[in-house]
Amino acid sequence: MEFPGAEPTRVYLHGLGASSPAYYAAVATSPALAGRRSLLMDLLGHGISDRPADASYTLEEHADLLATALSAAGVSAAEVIAHSMGGSVAIVLADRHPHLVSALVLVDATLDPQPPGVGLSARYTEEQFVHGHGRAETLTRVGPAWAATMRLSGPEALYRTAAHLGRGTTPTMRELLLELPMPRTYLHPAGAEPIGARVLTDAGVRVVAVPDAGHNIMLDNPEAFATATAAALKA
C-alpha cells in the first residue's frame, strides 16, 4: 500500500504473521504523520505479498528482497518504522543496505535470539506445522486479532521466518543496532523497559516509553504512537 506525499519516503514494516496496512494505515494517515510518501510493505510470505514455498525466509533474505523492492520503487534514504520481527528485518536492512535507510524507529522490536525451547520450531517440526495440525493450532492459540492477519501468511513463510527470528543473526540484531550510524529510536510500552536499555542509550539509541499500550503500540494507543514516531523523526 502506498500513500503519496513528500520525500523522504517513510517505510512501514509489520511483525511476524502480520500485515502493514492492517497495522499502520490509520497512524500513517494521522495528522502527526501524514503528508509523506508512505509505503506500507508486506514482507515476503505475508499479507498480499507472494508466498513461495522454496524461499529461505531468513532475516537476511527478507532484508535483501525488501531492498530490491525499495530500489525498484525509487526509494533511498527512507525513514523506516518497523514493529517486532519487522524491526529485526529493518536492522539487517540498515546494516546491509545503509543507503536505503536514513532513520530507524523500532517499535518493541526483537533484538535478541530466543532461548532454547521457545517458538514455533520448538513446538512443531516444519512438516507438522505446514502439513499437520500445527498451523491450525497456532491460529487458535494466538487469538482472533492476530489470526486475522496470520492466516494470510504462507505456512512455510510463517514457520521459517519464526525459526530464523528465534535464531537471530550473527552478529545479533542488538549488536548490529548499536553500531548503526543513522538516528535510531526504540519505542516500547511504558512499564516494560527493553532489556539492555542503558546500553542502547549509551550507544545513541533513543529509548521512548509509550503509555497505555502493549506490544502492538500502534493499535493500542495510535495517537501516542503517532506523536512519539513524529517526534523521533524530527529529533
Image (cartoon, rainbow, N blue to C red):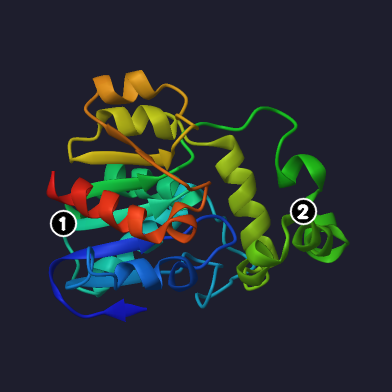
Residue of label 1: 77
Q: Quadrant of the C terminus?
A: top left
* Mark 2 Cα-neighbour bin, 10 Å: few <14, some 14–19, many ≥20: some
> Within the image, what quadrant is residue 55 found in?
bottom right
Residue 60 position in % (x across, y down):
44, 48
Q: Is residue 113 left or right of residue 37?
A: right
Q: Which mark is residue 154?
A: none
Pair 1/2: label in front: 1
Classify mark 2: helix, strand or loop.
helix
Q: Which mark is residue 126?
A: 2
> Residue 56, relative to residue 165: is it above or below?
below
The answer to which of 146 and 152 lies nearer the viewer is: 146
- Under mark 1, the amino acid is Ala
Q: Residue 92 appears at what percent x and percent y?
A: 37, 44
211 sits to left or right of 144: left
- Name the image quarter holding the N terminus: bottom left
**Residue in view at x 24 percent, y 74 percent:** 73
**Viewer-side residue, 5 vs 126:** 5
Q: How far from the left and from the top, in percent, is residue 229? A: 27, 52
